[in-house]
Amino acid sequence: QVQLVESGGGLVQSGGSLRLSCAVSGGDFVRIKMAWYRQPPGNQREWVAGIGATGISGNADSVKGRITMSRDSAKKMVFLEMNNLLPEDTAVYYCQANDRGQIVWGQGTQVTVSS
């Protein structure tokens, strides 16, 4: 059973940076597709970025050029590097694993961007 633990959230001023981490345990990490989602206050959860087993990643148009996802197979971790943060990036950020169709979510980490 895959388990996920996120870390790295916090309060940052507009224009600042944060790096979120997601530690993965269980499963075969190299075969697991990983993604980051976020849920802004009062809104639905939305996809932010994803990365496949090959390391090829993609991200939402709203964060292009500012947010990058990566994975470290040796550490069994994925990361979300966020730069030039905006108040509209305020949300709970969730790590998601897709292990051969089985979806697992982390507990979420709060990111708050002040203007």
Image (tube, grey):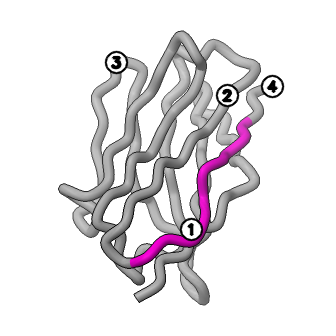
Q: Mark 2 points at which residue?
A: 24
Q: Mark 3 points at which residue?
A: 54
Up-down: is 82 above or below 3?
below
Q: How far apart are marks 3 and 4 (CA)?
A: 22 Å
- Residue visible at 51% across and 33% down? 78
* Upstream in sequence: badge 3 or badge 1: 3
What amino acid is at disc 4? Gln
Q: How far apart are marks 4 and 1 (CA)?
A: 27 Å
* Left or right of 30 in this view: 66: left
Which span of residues is magenta-colored?
A: 4-13
Q: How far apart are marks 3 and 1 (CA)?
A: 28 Å
* Upstream in sequence: badge 4 or badge 1: 4
Q: Mark 1 points at which residue?
A: 111
* Left or right of 93 in this view: 14: left
What amino acid is at disc 3? Thr
Q: How far apart are marks 2 and 3 (CA)?
A: 17 Å
